[in-house]
Image (spheres, rainbow, N blue to C red):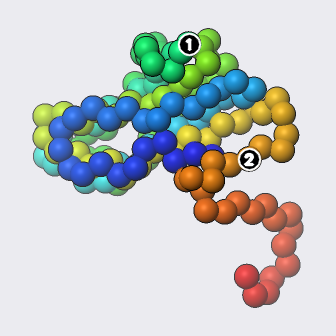
Amino acid sequence: VTRVSNAVAAGTATTNSASVDMKDFDAVTFVVSVGAISSTGTVTVKAQQSTDDSSFADLTGTAVAYTDADDNKLAILEITKPRERYVRAVVTTATANGTIDGVIAIQTGPMNEPVTHDSTTVVGSEQHLAPAEGTA
């Protein structure tokens, strides 16, 4: 799990998330959180890929569109078996202001375990199997 984009203040712009290295992973799911969208505003989320982590190209059919009726909703975009090593999300706000709350990337299907979360963006990680009730 990696936070690949922090919050972006209301405006009209294109924001590229940090890329994720898909070496040794089968899939990545981007969770894009959008805040307020002004009347007539639009927000579009899409995925791109790259072989060298510098020159990116759009992935066909990956666009998810928000309208001004979609304030405070999530877009979930999963890319399975990308053809190139690096993948990122791109969020575009247009026509009127849109706010981006942040973007999270969740890589799945690791070829090697254990997987270590990005310590620069994840404060902690726990897994509990059938926990008993009591003090947390």
Work out whether residue 76 can be spotted. Answer: no
Expressed as whole percent of the image width and height from the top left, the position of residue 134 reads 79, 87
Report the side of 14 relative to 105 (left or right).
Answer: left
Rendered residue at 52%/38% (across/down): 30
Residue 110: quarter of image: top right
Numbered tag placed on residue 26 in the rendering = none
Mark 2–mark 1 Cα distance, whole angstroms, equals 23 Å
Residue 24: quarter of image: top right
Report the side of 16 relative to 92 (left or right).
Answer: right
Work out whether residue 16 can be spotted. Answer: yes
Residue 128: quarter of image: bottom right
Expressed as whole percent of the image width and height from the top left, the position of residue 95 reads 13, 34
Quarter of the C terminus within the rendering: bottom right
Rendered residue at 27%/32% (across/down): 14
Q: Residue furthest bottom?
A: 135
Numbered tag placed on residue 51 in the rendering = 1
Residue type at the position of mark 1: Thr
Report the side of 112 relative to 7 (left or right).
Answer: right
115 shown above or below 48: below
Q: Nearest the camera: 132 or 88?
A: 88
Rendered residue at 70%/60% (across/down): 125
Which residue corresponds to mark 2? 116
Rendered residue at 67%/19% (across/down): 81
Secondary element under disc 2, as helix, strand or loop, is loop
